[in-house]
Amino acid sequence: FGSASTRFVGENGRLVRFYLRLQRLHLVQILKRFIAALRPAPSSSAQQKSLMAAVIRDRVLPYRGAKYRRTLQNFRENLEEILAACQRRKVPVLLSSLVSNLADQPPLNGEPPAPLPEAVSRDIQHLLQQGQQAETEGHYQTALWVYRQAFQLDSSAARLWYRLGRAHLASGDSLTAYHYLAGARDRDLIRFRASGEVNRIIRRLARQWQAHFVDLETVFRRHSPGGVPGKTLLCDHLHPNPRGYYLMARTFYEAILKTGLLSQPDPRFQPGEQPYYVTPLDWDIGQLKIFKMVHSWPFPEQKVTYRDYRPVGDSLSKAVALHYLFEENVWNKAHFRLAEAYVAHRAPEKALREYAAVAFYTPRDPYPFLQIARLYRQRQQWAESATYYRLALQRAPRTPLWRYQLALVLWKTGKLPEAIQEMQRALQLPGMTPREKQNARFYLAGFWADAGHPENARWILEELLQEDPQFTPAQIFLRKLERDSPPRH
């Protein structure tokens, strides 16, 4: 119900808010469904539109035009209504400034808001080509001089603000670069990015209503090259990538701590610098979701297929990400699928990373812990393997074969008393086959022998041979014990 939306009931904010309240009535909902049923089915071209193309009615909203100003007024009134409702109910509020991609997002429709004389338009185009050529060759001061000539001919075009900003950024003048790049954003004619005036409204209302203000824009600038937010933290024109979302979450967490709203924060929790257990597969899933969108309107249009996508990870990560998106949309299974592919391609470090990601996000599931334990065991990293077998058993303590494997790993580390204890526990649990039990008892005999208790080992081996006289490993082991140990009395 925005000023330029396809769902539109007028620019008067009070009317829109009244209409939204009416929608709670069952009668209005029935009427809406009835009207929707009478509408003709959308054409195939309409069905192929991206969401961005489908929601926008007015494709041009000039900077500081009448509709632009009306939109800001509606935004301010809506936010004030929310803040008033929270204040009446004594609900604490944190208000954040908005962030968008300034450094790497060309203006959305950066043409002049009004047509220029043909000669002026031609001169600007020629100057732009000269400036871009100078930038390509690394002659940034020349590029700046050329862009300034074009800017004098027309200072209203967002593309000229953007080119000046990029040239200043490349030449190391980050403050001036930010001025021009923010100005380019403000002059977007297709308004999917909020202008700087929106942040000024937020800041002013936070102060007026005594809400806690979180200056996320400044935080993103502080963590961006040259102090200008771009693709290092954002994946398109305004949505953060995993690093950006983590920075956003950490900023809000720190703000909540400062307000005292979190009465007993866990002192053990210390946020780091990077998102936790986000793997290249997660990046590829996200980037593939928006890949076609960012190559269609309102972005520079280019016909692409998923074959053109260059993965953040590798070809295996891309293949699994596509499988996740279009065949089996189960996140943990996607990570398991990629881990198995890495194991098959002898890349155990990458496989460990995928299993660890699932273990972190589904901490009650023993499966990823078990797979990590097995990978460490294959690499003969016995201590690490034992740690993860224990973590798996904490989640499924009555699984005898896992205790059996833990006992073997403990034996490899020389922790014989613990190995004996775990193997005895495994033998007491139901679920092992007769052959598995036989092997477990045989290993237990070995543990006792290594621990300096050959009499216990002999007793187990004799019992095994009574049950199965043809069990050759027990015959050999028993003969060795009798040869190496003094006779029993």
Image (cartoon, rainbow, N blue to C red):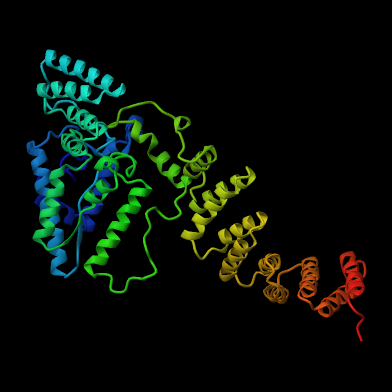
Residue visible at 60% across and 49% down in the picture: 348
- In the image, is 215 to the left or to the right of 465? left
Above or below, comparing residue 393 to residue 135 in the picture: below
Q: Position of residue 403 (x, y in %)?
A: 67, 69
Quadrant position of residue 141:
top left
Quadrant position of residue 59:
top left
- Res 189 visible: yes
- In the image, is 77 to the left or to the right of 104? left
- Res 18 visible: no
- In the image, is 84 to the left or to the right of 381? left
The extreme left residue here reads: 66
Q: Position of residue 222 (x, y in %)?
A: 26, 48
Q: Position of residue 450 (x, y in %)?
A: 78, 72
Q: Nearer the viewer, residue 49 or 423?
A: 423
Indicate the quadrant containing the C terminus: top left, top right, bottom left or bottom right. bottom right
Above or below, comparing residue 28 to residue 414 in the picture: above
